[in-house]
Amino acid sequence: MRPILYFIPFFFLLIAIEMWVAHRRGLKLYRLQDTITSLNIGMVSQFVNTVGGIITLVMYSIIVDRFGAFTWDLKNPLTWITALVLYDFFYYWVHRTGHEVNILWAAHVVHHSSEEFNLSTALRQSSTGFYFRWVFYIPLALLGFPVQVFIIVGLIDLVYQYWVHTQLIGRLGFLELFLVTPSNHRVHHGQNDYCIDKNYGGILSIWDRMFGTYADEREDEKPIYGVRKPLQSWNPIWGNVHHYVAIYKQARATPGWRNKLMCFFAGPSWVPPEQAAHTETFEPSKFVRFSTPSPQWMKTLAITSSVIGTALLVHFLIVQANLTMGQRIAYSAAVMVSYFLIGLAWLHPKVLKAAHE
Ligand SMILES: [Zn+2]
Ligand SMILES: [Zn+2]
């Protein structure tokens, strides 16, 4: 059984608490379509990663078995602390390249596609990062940290990052100096000029300070959440693939092999030199969040689909150990197709037209 299963009630409980506190303070932090989309993206990523995550674990296990240099005493707390700090360091580089190399950004962009910032945003995890992320952790395997240690410190790093996705917690004094906090992670999710490519840390922000990517939240210019090429969709599957499609189209339209390669491997804002003069800076006051009509029937459909999806996910996580790989893929694919169709329905012109009437 995947350990993340145990955290699902805890995640939902904290979302409910955040909604309640925000309501009492008169803050509008949640919009239904955005929240449901975040939940659906999180759910889809869990389905995919129960299959995709196996690649990471198999590769890691092979390397540690063949090349692991040291034997670590698992009863010694220092083993765990060392593994966690090293994992967090490599996470910094996974995350940084996920922002600064376009084809890797195509996997990570989905985490940034919400134009809100709340605990449900944390659940927007990528479904396509599994094919490359494990490469960054090879040094941990070479050092001989057993696969169980790798799984547990990875889980700690991931679960830690949940609570920093909130606007209800202000700056935290000296903790800002070395920890990833809600304040400095808000900057990470901003699309303002001062937020771009900043604060990549998982648990520790010291890596950002060491490598020159740290920025404090500004009182005079609060972050505007989202990305500069907005998703403009509530479809969890499209959220995961849209930037791959955009890169493909850009590469096709760009003349010259060198420039075509740059479309994949340069930063997401790269454009051919002759177009560079047209790039714009971000104007916070002009930003308009994506929204669509949301009549009662659509709300009911949205909530129902998420409840059924979550129930299916819990069922899948419980039984998946007894399923063959083919059955796992079939189960995941069936859910994926359903969510793709629901996502299409939400934005179908006829549906939107009916919603207006
Ligand atoms: Zn990021
Ligand atoms: Zn985040």
Image (cartoon, helix red, strand yellow):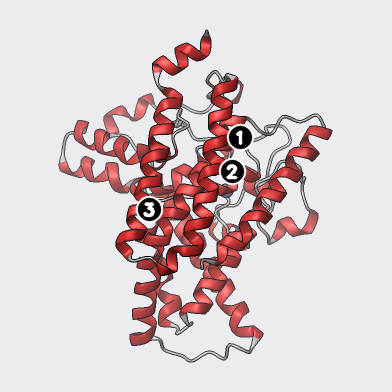
Q: Quadrant of residue 3?
A: bottom right
> Please, what is the three-letter code of the amino acid marked with disc 2?
Thr
Disc assigned to residue 131: none
For marks 1 and 3, the one nearer the N-term is 1
Left or right of 263, for residue 193: right
Q: Decide which of 1, 61 is in the foreground and name it.
A: 1
For label 1, the residue is: 116
Give how far across and how far down residue 90 sits, in percent. Answer: 49, 66
Left or right of 336, for residue 124: right
Q: Secondary structure at mark 2?
A: helix
Asked if the beta carbon under badge 3 is closer than 8 A to the nearest atom of ligand 2, the reply is no
Residue occupying image coordinates x 33% and y 86%: 66
> Please, what is the three-letter code of the amino acid marked with disc 3?
Tyr
Asked if the beta carbon under badge 2 is closer than 8 A to the nearest atom of ligand 2, the reply is yes
Q: CA distance from mark 2 to mark 3?
A: 25 Å
For marks 2 and 3, the one nearer the N-term is 2
Q: Decide which of 64, 347 is in the foreground and name it.
A: 347
Residue occupying image coordinates x 39% and y 29%: 344
Q: CA distance from mark 2 to mark 1?
A: 7 Å
Nearer the camera: disc 1 or disc 3: 3
Left or right of 317, for residue 20: right
Q: Secondary structure at mark 3?
A: helix
Extreme residue toward the top, this view: 357
Residue 137 sits above or below residue 329 on the image = below
Disc assigned to residue 121: 2
Q: Secondary structure at mark 1?
A: loop
Nearer the camera: disc 2 or disc 3: 3
